Image (spheres, rainbow, N blue to C red):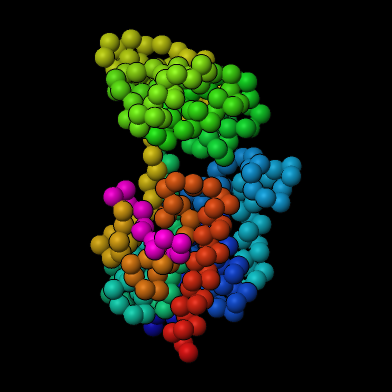
Amino acid sequence: MPPIYNRVTIIGSGPAGHTAAIYLARAQMEPIMFEGMMANGFAPGGQLTTTTDVENFPGFPNGIQGGELMERMREQSVHCGTVIETETITKIDITTRPFKIWREGTEEQPEPTDTSTAIVFATGASAKRMHLPGEDIYWQNGISACAVCDGAVPIFRNKPLVVIGGGDSAAEEATYLTKYGSHVHVLVRRDVLRASKVMANRLLNHPKVTVHFNTVPVECLGDGNLLDRVSTRNTKTGEEGVIEANGLFYAIGHTPATALLKGQIELDEAGYIKTVPGTTHTSVKGVFAAGDVQDKHYRQAVTSAGTGCMAALDAERYLTELED
């Protein structure tokens, strides 16, 4: 069976992917989206499907559940004319024209299942986690990987909180959380902070922050519904302890979902797709990157949606000029 040809293909189904889909469909570009089935460990819709209350996405004064927000975006994409396939793309070849795309289960076949003139890559990034005992029980019930997203949630207000990590991200998130928590404990596995000197000094001198050096979390504990404490171990002495905490925030980095592109496109040292500043253009003409897969700084739903819009406009312009 010959490959199915599409003018523009969107890989990924978070805010970036769906915003790109809405704009491209309205521009009559006839986009197809591969939303993935547990791609990168997430259900269709991406990271937001694992989030409960989303209070910082414009248009929802009373907040909205992450899963519901993504379902609404999906409905809008379909309403505008996007074809959505609940399949995962496991292989692509962007060294030839048109680009070649293989759906899951067909990657060993010599011929692709699909081809496309343009691709919007919006596969996101996943937060690194330690998968501690009890973590699955309290994920989004006291455990998070985004202080800016979740820090203001009522269960964290005026409560002791824990941040894991010793770099700039951990310092920023811990400082941010002091606005809401009663006290913030930062667990650093080494005897020094990796954060820049300015960020480290700010953290160490903050009256609402205690930095625990040579300390790692061991287990997440609670009442079965909400987290209320974290057990710890000193990496030098082996001494064990417990910190009362109603929130645990990971700040140990993210992994961008770019494995499909390695060796075919320019990535930075952390594996994020490099884009031309101010655009979503990548090092390969016709391939555009949007959302967290190219953004290691902001990582917000609304900024992902913004770059999804940019990618759609860039792709539309590219296709129009190509076809003229």
- State the image coordinates of residue 301 (x, y, percent, origin top left): 56, 50
Residue nearer the viewer, 39 or 189: 189
Q: Residue at x 31, y 53 (%)?
A: 268
Within the magenta stretch, is there residue 153? no
Residue located farthest toward the right when viewing the structure as drawn = 62
Which secondary structure type mostly characterizes the magenta part of the structure?
Answer: loop
| Image location of residue 133, percent across then percent down | 42, 26
Horizontal side of residue 221 vs 166, given as left or right: right
Residue found at the very far bottom of the displayed protein: 324
- Above or below — where is 97 with respect to 275? below
**Number of numbered discs overlaid on the protein picture:** 0
Q: Nearer the viewer, residue 159 or 310?
A: 310
Residue at image x 39%, y 34%?
168
Q: Compared with residue 47, is residue 102 higher up or lower down, i.e. above or below?
A: below
Please determine whether, in this image, residue 70 is positioned above or below residue 286: above
State the image quarter where residue 284 is shown. bottom left
- Compare residues 239 and 114 and report the one nearer the observer: 239
Instruction: Identify the residue at image location x=60%, y=26%.
Output: 180
Asked whether residue 127 appears in the rendered view, the answer is yes
Q: Quadrant of residue 231?
A: top left
Q: Residue 225: x, y in percent?
A: 60, 26
On the image, the x and y values in percent for residue 1 come to 39, 82
Q: Give the left or right position of residue 301, taking residue 217 as reference.
A: right
Direction front: furthest residue: 198
Tell me the magenta residue range.
269-280
Q: Give the residue displayed 47% in from the left and 80% down from the top.
A: 319
Residue 65 visible within the image: no
